Image (spheres, rainbow, N blue to C red):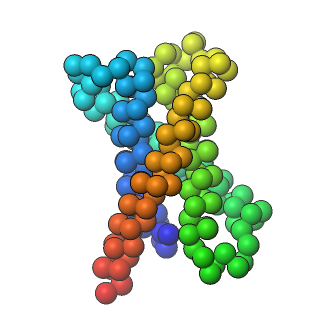
Amino acid sequence: MPRNLKEELLFTAMMAGLMVIVMETYNIVLSSGIKVGLVMEILKGYPLALIVAAILDLALVGPLVKFIFFNYIFKPEWKQTPIKIALSISTMMVLGMVTLMSVFGIIVTFGFNNLSWGLYGHAWLTNLIVALPLQLVIVGPICRFLLMKFQTSKDA
């Protein structure tokens, strides 16, 4: 896990960068299908989605998740198995980010006036079923591995 602000920013950039590109691709394909111009549509929306995701992660969801986890869920014996900490925080992060980024996606795609509970519930569920395994099985392990390599190279 990140040990300082520089590592937190690096870790967030990697995590958000990978999650946003995959989730954006998934949502565009769900909404419009695979068609000519798909790559350009993904690249067009990526910068804004990445900025929004990074800000939400660093300023709201990350601090809130860590506060809740370390004050109400964490057990000291978990220090012996850091994977429990990583998986718990990752799961909570996905729940928070899917909750907020689903609103962002609906507004960008359909406009603020078309935001409804039905549309939001559908978006939230379809995003969660991809984002959670993506984070726990692919993106999270890759980013933790890369962070560990970065930390090891800095410590040497």
Position of residue 119 measured from the top left corner of the image (x, y, whole percent): 60, 19
Q: Does residue 118 sit above or below 17 in this rendering?
A: above
Picture quadrant of residue 149: bottom left
> Which residue is situated farthest in the top direction here?
113
Is residue 137 toward the left or the right of residue 69 in the image?
A: left
On the image, the x and y values in percent for residue 74 come to 71, 68
- Along the horizontal axis of the image, is 141 left or right of 86? left
Q: Quadrant of residue 145?
A: bottom left
* Residue 98, visible in the rendered structure: yes
Which quadrant of the structure image shows residue 118? Answer: top right
Residue 154 against residue 49 in the figure, above or below: below
Residue in view at x 43 percent, y 61 percent = 141
Residue 46 screen position, x and y as percent: 34, 35
Q: Residue at x 27, y 25 (%)?
A: 38
Apparent side of residue 72 relative to residue 3 in the rendered image (left or right): right
Q: Does residue 8 sit above or below 92 in this rendering?
A: below
- The number of numbered badges drawn on the structure is 0
Residue 56 visible? The answer is: no
Q: Nearer the viewer, residue 84 or 151?
A: 84
Q: Residue furthest bottom?
A: 156
* Image quarter hosting the C terminus: bottom left
Residue 127, horizontal then vertical, whole percent = 52, 35
Left or right: 66, with 136 as reference point: right
Q: Does 73 appear above or below 62? A: below
Name the residue located 54 percent from the left edge and 38 percent from the top edge: 129
Q: Residue at 37% of width from left, 48% of height from top?
A: 18
